[in-house]
Amino acid sequence: MARTIAIVNQKGGVGKTTTTVNLAASIARSGLRVLLVDLDPQGNATMGSGIDKRALPQTVYHVLLGLATIERARTRSESGGFDVLPANRELAGAEIELVDLENRETRLKSALALVADRFDFILIDCPPSLSLLTLNGLAAAHAVVIPMQCEYYALEGLSDLVNTIRKVRQTINPSLEIEGLLRTMFDPRNTLSQQVSDQLQQHFGAKVYETVIPRNVRLAEAPSHGIPGIRYDESSKGAQAYLQLAEEMLERFRLASPTGGL
Ligand code: ADP
Ligand code: MG
């Protein structure tokens, strides 16, 4: 049974997609089977995995509306070594079309249940909103990873997100956990970043990953080549950080389930 993790933060530009693609590639490299689900109509995770979002007969949109199975709609990221349930702009329409459908918040969860035994990890890249699409991600997940930039308003946004997670627990997904908070695009020379980072650790303690993702231009260049950063320039500081993050995640996971869980 796959462990399903939603990468979520209602703020845009905090590194959700970069984290999803690089974690998927890092976990896949250790020999595990990974499915990346792109839940953002921008399709950045799809493109960053080397898949042309304009040339897709079926996507996560069709899966959410019950027009295709994941088995049919999934495709392979050759550059990343994992499977992708891709997205493109069509997904923006799902938001409206889902409203009148039954079980509108748990459609992704039901679809993923049919393929959960084929993967070790399912990583869901959420859009920058607390929309119906994000709720589908939160309903389907065992846990969330929250990437964040250590800037002044970050903590405020975080309390909105934590409240949403609480509400989701009370309704559609009682067992949803916070897997970890990830500091992204970090610049240790910036004193404000350091202060926000300290506050984060005071508030969330061990939930904050020890691994910090530095600001690194190679990570930003990789998507335009359709290659995950960890494969585009493995020796870069950014790539090394994501490889280390995957190690830290897998280690936490092993500790949480001594039988290995996989
Ligand atoms: P989100 O999915 O939260 O909107 P992205 O992962 O798309 O965020 O990142 C936003 C932008 O910042 C992208 O252009 C991405 O390439 C760049 N970026 C992400 N992480 C880093 C990093 N660690 N260093 C430098 N640039 C980064
Ligand atoms: Mg994104």
Image: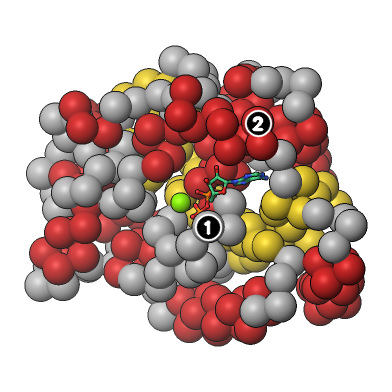
Label 1 lies in ligand 1 vicinity (Cβ under 8 Å): yes
Q: Seen in the image, is 133 located left or right of residue 244?
A: left
- The answer to whether the residues at label 2 and label 1 have Cβ atoms under 8 Å apart is no
Q: Which x, y percent locates residue 176?
A: 55, 66
Q: Residue at x 49, y 32 (%)?
A: 223
Residue lying farthest to the top in this orientation: 78
Circle 1 residue: 13
Could you say whether the residue bearing mark 2 is in a helix, strand or loop? Answer: helix
Q: Amino acid at mark 2?
A: Arg
Disc 2 crowd, CA 10 A, few/some/many (<14, 14-19, 20+):
some
Q: Which x, y percent locates residue 20?
A: 54, 43
Q: Which x, y percent locates residue 65?
A: 14, 53
Asked whether residue 207 appears in the rendered view, the answer is: no
Compared with residue 204, is residue 13 higher up or lower down, i.e. above or below?
above
Q: Residue at x 63, y 83 (%)?
A: 156
Circle 2 residue: 218
Disc 1 crowd, CA 10 A, few/some/many (<14, 14-19, 20+):
few
Asked whether residue 60 appears in the rendered view, the answer is: yes
Compared with residue 248, is residue 129 higher up or lower down, i.e. above or below?
below
Q: Residue at x 65, y 62 (%)?
A: 148
Q: Quadrant of residue 62?
A: top left
Q: Mark 2 to mark 1: distance in Å?
A: 16 Å
The colour scheme used to paint the residues is secondary structure
Q: Amino acid at mark 1?
A: Gly
Numbered tag placed on residue 85 in the rendering = none
Q: Seen in the image, is 227 located left or right of residue 139?
A: right
Q: Residue at x 81, y 54 (%)?
A: 187
Could you say whether the residue bearing mark 1 is in a helix, strand or loop? Answer: loop
Label 2 lies in ligand 1 vicinity (Cβ under 8 Å): no
